[in-house]
Structures are given as structure tokens and as C-alpha cells.
Image: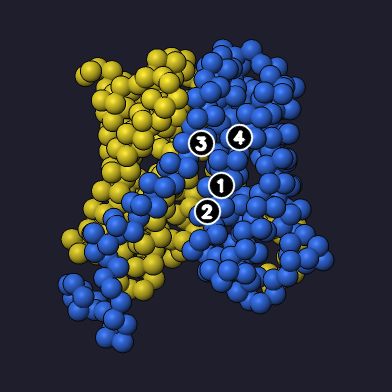
Amino acid sequence: MPGHATARDVYRQALPVILVSLVAGLFAGTILGTETMRSFIADVPGLLLLLPAFLATRGGVYGSLGARLSTGLHQGLIEPRFQLDRRLTNAIVASFINGMSVSVFIAVVTYLWLGLLGSDGSLLELVGIMVVAGFLSAVLMISVLITVIFVGYRRGLDPDNVIGPVVTTLGDVFGVFFLLVGVVVVGGVV
Amino acid sequence: MSAPGDASQSPDRPLPDEWSIPRIVRTMVPLLAVLSVLQLVSGTVLQTYEATLVRYPALLVLVPVQIGTAGNLASITCSRLTTQLHLGTYELSLANPELRANAGAVFALAGTVFGVVGVAAWAIGLALGGALGLGRVLLVSLSSGMLLAGLVVVTSVAAVEASYRVGLNPDDTTIPVVTNVCDIAGVLILFAVVTLVV
């Protein structure tokens, strides 16, 4: 019974998930700490400002897609294979729209906030970086989530137990990496 | 089952279509927008310490772990307490064994995670050309981690207690709010400690 769990029980149950997110965080941190990323941080005003919001919304957007698909599977509303089912495609399209619009929103708010803080950034540059990073994250997160949830479900895994670690790990690691790619791409264009 | 559209919806549940694109977008986008504005608080702190972070990569390595772990610990504590709430065995008291077990586990988990992270961040920082000593990185990591654990316990208990009194379902509201608040607090605490130590 939950009422009788000891601190040791709670520790043992929670440790695996915590360690997964720890490893993911260290990877993300290592990318952040590289020479290249540090020079981008110094060169692009607003990059650090938008970082936490960008990472946090990855979790929000794709965590909720995962939860929705998992509920749909449990209720028998969707089937665990990729097909042009209205519910499945709607959920995917909606999470893509969510991811992209929130990314652009973050860029705009960051630009405005930078102005209030008294430093100037480039709106075009920030929006460009967020569009590239948001798009790449969406493609990666949606395809990996669907694959992992469907394949896992067919093999008897409860998607609810898989979504959290998958979203945290991929979201953090690739979030930071795609941010870096975004800076490179936009730097090449602008 | 393979019938398209709403044909498979049972007639006794005339729910609005939870799977329509406008509905999903309209529900999620305002929430995500508010969340990202909140996260600008963390972003502002990071921005303020830009020079320090660029100079000491070990500290930059700590940032994502600090952001993620706080929310994780908070969500574990909250979901266990809200389960108790649903089962009717929750009680705000130091004698509540679940509360004590949780608090103990959160501190032990924080000690484990931030000990490992301190050593790892130091090593990675060194490889990336940083100059912070092991003692200092470990001190920053462990002391901010332990402060964070204390904050997670207090915030989670307060939030569960508050949502219980107001009558909100804690699963819907408490966990997202507390997770985000703790993530933001994680960054604030980290840099409060950095200011003192580095």
C-alpha cells in the first residue's frame, strides 16, 4: 500500500527515471558547454534568455502528445500502427502546430524582453533560430514518440511509463542540439 | 473500431470531440504561452550570468540537470501525495509516514543526483577548457541540490494542501504548476549559490 512505503522504497522506485533525466541533462549540458555553443551564446543576444522556455515547452507539447496517444490506445480509440486515422493525424498535426507557434511566440517574447532589459537583439534572427529548432524538434519528437509508443504497446509496454523518460531525454538533448543547428543555419542565411 | 470519425464514440458519453485540431491547439497554446513567459524568469537569470557561464563551462553543464531534476522530484512527491489524497489517507502532519518517507527520499535522491552531477560537470568542464576546481563545482552542485530538495518538499506539500482545500483536482493543476515553479526555482537557487561560491 502506498501509505506504507518507506523512504527507501520511494528512492528505489524513483531512481531509474531520475537517472535517465540526469544522463540526458548531462548530454544537453555538454553540448551547451562546448566551445561552439559558448561562442554562439556570447554572439547571439537572447539565446540564454530563451533556452529554459524552449526546453520546457518541448516537454509540454510532446509530453501531452504522448499522454493523448497513450489514452487513445488504452481506450481503443486509436490502433497501435501508423495509418491515416483521423484521430492520430489530428493529434500529430495539432502538436506540430503547438510546437511551432509556441517556438515563434518564445522568439517574439524574448525579443521584447531583451528590449526591456536594455539590450538589443534581432527579431529576425531569434524567430529564424526558433523556427529551425522548433521544426527539427517536432519532426524528431513526433516520429520517435509514435514509434516508441506503438512498438512498445504492441510488445506489452504501458506507454504511460515510457513517455516521461523519452520526452525528457530526447527533448533536452536534441533541444539544445537543434538550437545550435538553428544558430548555424540562420547565421548562414542572415 | 476502424469506423472513421465519431461513429465509434459511445452514445452515452456526448463529450466534445477531444481529437479535433482546433480544440487541442486552443487548449494547449495559451497554457504553453504562459509557461514559456514564466520560464523567461530562469532565462533572465541565465542571461545575467552570461559572462560567468561562458567562462566556466562546468556551470553551463549544471544548468539543464538543475532545470530537469527539480521538476522531476516535485512531480514524484506531488503524485504520491495526491494519490494519498484520492485514497483518503492524506494528512498534513509530521507523523504522516508517507510524507516523511517522501521527504527522506527526495533528500536522498537529490544527494545522489547532485553528487554525481557535481563530479561529472567538473570533469566535462575540464575537458571543455574550464578552470573550476572539483571542490568548488561539487560545493555548488550539492549545496544548490540540497536547498532545492528542501524547496521541493515544502512547495509540493503546500500545493497539494492548497488544491485540497480549494477543491481542485491536484492531478490537473498541482503537478504542472509545481513542476514549473520548481524548475524555475532550481535555476534561481543555482545562481544564488554561484554568486556566493564562485
> Which residue is at 26% across, 79% downward?
B9
Circles 4 and 2, Cβ within 8 Å, touching? The answer is no
Q: Amino acid at mark 2?
A: Val
User: Closer to the N terminus: mark 3 or mark 4?
Assistant: 3
Pointer 3 and pointer 2 on the same chain? yes
Q: Is the residue marked by circle 4 packed among few (<14), some (14-19), or many (20+) residues within 10 Å? A: many
Secondary structure beneath disc 3? helix
Residue A104 pos. (x, y %): 29, 37
Apparent colour of chain B? blue
Residues marked 3 and 2 touching at CB (< 8 Å): no
**Label 4 sits on residue:** B188
Q: Is residue A82 left or right of residue A160?
A: left
Q: CA distance from mark 1 to mark 4?
A: 11 Å
For residue B181, the mark is 1
Q: Mark 1: which amino acid? A: Val
* Residue A178 in view of the camera: no
* Dots 1, 3 in contact, CB < 8 A: no
Chain letter for the residue marked with disc 4 in the picture: B
Q: Are the residues flagged by discs 3 and 4 in contact, CB closer than 8 Å?
A: yes
The disc numbered 1 marks a residue on which chain? B
- Tags 1 and 2 touching, CB below 8 Å: yes
Q: Is residue A99 above or below residue A110?
A: below
Name the residue at 52% across, 65% down.
Answer: B171
Cα distance in 3D space between marks 3 and 2: 15 Å
User: Disc 1 versus disc 3: distance between alpha carbons?
Assistant: 10 Å
